[in-house]
Image (cartoon, rainbow, N blue to C red):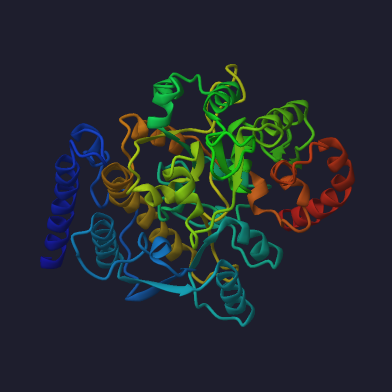
Amino acid sequence: MVKKILLVLLLSVLLASMMACGASDAGTKSGPDAKENNAEPHENASPKSDGLPDRDFEGYDFTILTREGASFTREIIAESITGETINDAVFARNAEIEERFGVKISVVTRPERGDVTTAFMNSIKSGGHDYDVALNASQQAASIITQDGAYNWINIPYIGFDNPWWDKSAHENLKVNGKLFAFVGDITLSPIDYMYVMLYNKNIGKNYGIENLGELALAGKWTLDEMAKVMAQTTKDLNGDGQMDDNDLWGLAYLFNAGTMAFQIGCELYPIKKDRDGIPEINMASPKMVDAFEKVFDIIAGGKNAYELQLDHSDNKVINFFAGGRAFMLTSAVTNLFLFREMEDDFGILPYPKYDLTQENYYSYVAPYGNLIVLPSNLENPERTGIVLESMCAGAYKSVVPAYFEVTLPAKLTRDENSMEILALVKSMRSYDFSRIVPANSVEIVYMFQNLISAKNKSYMAYHEKHIDNSKIGFDKYLQHYFE
């Protein structure tokens, strides 16, 4: 009883401190006003508002396998109270769950995403039960599924798929024939970290008569055409040598792969769509897909206003290029915002542009480095797994996600008054389509949009005709795992 009282007090102190942290950052350069920084607790924030039954699992060690690094473990486990907002929210959440259900939450890590998959499958193949769940890069899910290593989430009791702590897009698009082999929820912060956005240098914008892009985006008017216009306005040969290079000003610096794939998703165009019967099919040759490719190609690959960057933290090129005033706009995952904490110029955040003004919503891309959750096919106790994961996700929704999204991001990583509103908009429109869990080597065609842009090859339909047959064969073979 004493321990339960202490847990309630801890949760109360945590929520109060989150609100205080937000208020204390008001007025600083790195955060918006106090109202935006306040982390209000979600409705029904009682620890037991998840509707789960009380169970005693007698000290069971619930083991989560993931990648090494604080960015992958911080939302899962915390050793003690430290005063750091996310850490303390995780500690309080876990302590309540461990007390309530008689479990011990543990984490095992492996260096890289491929190592996580190997360890997970080795345990299954040896008949072991080393891991209750794996959190790993979404592109690794296909390897586990093709080896029959994934358990069907639909058969897990107590998982409330309609609850706000589970991703509805993932539930709708990754489920086929009543089988959901990979899923995602608020237990992991990586879907926020790896959302793709666009940054823009407000100082450069003012110099070229461009202001209030954030307000334009919030009004629903940020489109490919608008992006092309401001890129043209801000691209300048600064040294007058007649050559555009690293020493000049570019309208856009974009990151290969995820940075270009995000344009496709932003146009509400998915590499794989479901037909009327709910069966996924490759969707790379629709008229709108071809038109959007040509439009994006002309803007960022065929024109003279965009510069392609490779993300390389070792030489800080991305930091120097944007922070050094060599690009008006930059494509970026949210996790990379910390790179610009010391940037002198003010910058704002934008969603990826719409295809045109007839498109109702913005759509945001989550890079494949973000986690999906996979359960081992030889799962011993589905009830226990369901209860622990549901309670962890519910707890994260109520305290961990607010600690990150409503306190840490406003206080440390954003400056523009519209940025948090735009990030909330981007978060609400995260999109998962089935292409993120298909084998890249056998269904290559789903990446043709980004690959052709990087290669500066505009022969879209020629590439499609060359690769579609083999990709269909590979895709159909992969789908058999959902119909066995």
The residue that appears at 75% across and 53% down in the rendered structure is: 479
User: Relative to 388, is 395 above or below?
Assistant: above
Indicate the quadrant where residue 98 lies.
Answer: bottom left
Give the farthest residue toward the top.
358
Q: How many marks?
A: 0
The residue that appears at 71% across and 54% down in the rendered structure is: 482
On the rendered image, what quadrant is the C terminus found in?
Answer: bottom right
Give the farthest residue toward the bottom.
126
The answer to which of 384 and 262 lies nearer the viewer is 262
The answer to which of 163 and 54 lies nearer the viewer is 163
Where is residue 115 shown, x and y percent of the image?
57, 73
Where is residue 457 shown, x and y percent of the image?
79, 41
Indicate the quadrant where residue 74 lies.
Answer: bottom left
- Asked whether, in this view, residue 356 is left or right of residue 314, the answer is right
User: Relative to 138, is 414 above or below?
Assistant: above
Residue 255 at least partly seen? yes
The residue that appears at 16% across and 40% down in the rendered structure is: 23
Where is residue 63 shown, x and y percent of the image?
43, 72
Indicate the quadrant where residue 353 lies.
Answer: top right
- Asked whether, in this view, residue 154 is left or right of residue 1, the answer is right
Where is residue 236 shown, x and y percent of the image?
55, 31
On the rendered image, what quadrant is the N terminus found in?
Answer: bottom left
Residue 178 at least partly seen? no
